[in-house]
Image: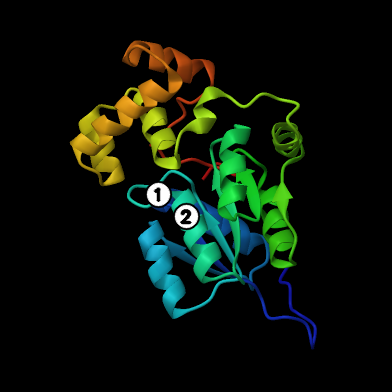
């Protein structure tokens, strides 16, 4: 059923999808437009492409992945919040751990949703953000509140920078330094330096111990393949 705005109501939403997987963007676009065919949905394959798009036109809501080559999703969130404060940002990612959500909200995100969420929840999150609200799934919100209230001790990797956390996840997933450097558009020397600092901050003796730590804390879920919501795209 087509949703036609009544006279005097706001124009249909304009959304920008930011994900480096074309299959994911195509699936999300179909889900959003099925919810409301009048929603305008544009796409960007990277953080840099998204910022270039926003320099030329406006979006009501940016829907961004966290794990992308080059500029990370967290960096994109920070830049959108700084340069386009009227634009709302929904992080849509495979990472369900509260540490990622905390970092996203601290960077300026207005909502956080995992890719295994139902498509109806995605549309609800977008609509809530566009109306000026915030959004997080109930289970995630409870874990975030526990972290913020101090009732749950933060894990050791909470002290890592956003880039170090990204390198850590990829090391735990078994990626080689050269592959990590290629994916993140960094030099091998820079990635090696990140690895050294990660081991020092976590007080771990070697890569094997780091991998064990990462698996124990569910940090081995690198988004290297197209993900999907429950629509099976």
The reply, left or right, for residue 156 in relation to residue 187 is right
Rendering colour mode: rainbow
Q: Is residue 106 above or below residue 192?
A: below
Q: Residue 165, percent across and down?
A: 44, 34
The reply, left or right, for residue 166 in relation to residue 93 is left
* Quadrant location of the N terminus in the rendered image: bottom right
Residue drawn at x 66%, y 76% is 12
Q: Residue 106, percent across and down?
A: 60, 49
Residue drawn at x 20%, y 33% is 178
Q: Is residue 120 above or below residue 193?
A: below
Would residue 96 be visible to someone looking at this image?
no
Describe the element under mark 2 as helix, strand or loop. helix
Q: CA distance from mark 2 to mark 1?
A: 6 Å
Q: Residue 98, percent across and down?
A: 63, 34
Would residue 216 be visible to someone looking at this image?
yes
Q: Quadrant of residue 168?
A: top left
Describe the element under mark 1 as helix, strand or loop. loop
Q: Quadrant of residue 41?
A: bottom right
* Near-viewer residue (21 or 47): 47
Residue drawn at x 46%, y 33% is 160
The residue tagged 2 is 25
Q: Residues within 10 Å of mark 1 (few under 14, many from 20)?
A: some
Residue drawn at x 70%, y 61% is 129
Q: Residue 59, percent across and down?
A: 56, 72
The residue tagged 1 is 21
* Near-viewer residue (136 or 13): 136
């Amino acid at each position: 059923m087509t949703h036609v705005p009544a006279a005097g109501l706001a124009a249909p939403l304009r959304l920008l999808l930011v994900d480096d997987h074309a299959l994911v963007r195509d699936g999300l676009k179909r889900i959003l437009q099925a919810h409301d065919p009048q929603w305008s949905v544009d796409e960007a394959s990277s953080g840099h492409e998204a910022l270039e798009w926003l320099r030329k036109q406006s979006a009501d809501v940016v829907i961004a992945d966290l794990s992308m080559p080059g500029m990370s999703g967290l960096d994109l969130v920070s830049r959108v919040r700084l340069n386009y404060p009227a634009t709302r940002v929904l992080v849509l990612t495979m990472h369900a751990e509260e540490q990622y959500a905390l970092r996203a909200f601290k960077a300026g995100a207005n909502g956080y949703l995992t890719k295994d969420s139902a498509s109806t929840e995605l549309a609800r999150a977008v609509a809530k953000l566009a109306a000026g609200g915030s959004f997080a799934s109930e289970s995630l919100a409870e874990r975030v509140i526990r972290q913020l209230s101090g009732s749950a001790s933060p894990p050791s990797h909470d002290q890592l920078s956003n880039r170090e956390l990204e390198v850590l996840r990829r090391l735990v997933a078994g990626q080689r330094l050269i592959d990590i450097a290629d994916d993140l558009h960094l030099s091998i020397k820079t990635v090696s330096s990140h690895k050294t600092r990660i081991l020092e901050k976590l007080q771990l003796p070697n890569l094997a111990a780091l991998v064990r730590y990462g698996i124990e804390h569910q940090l081995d879920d690198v988004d290297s393949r197209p993900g999907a919501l429950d629509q099976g795209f």
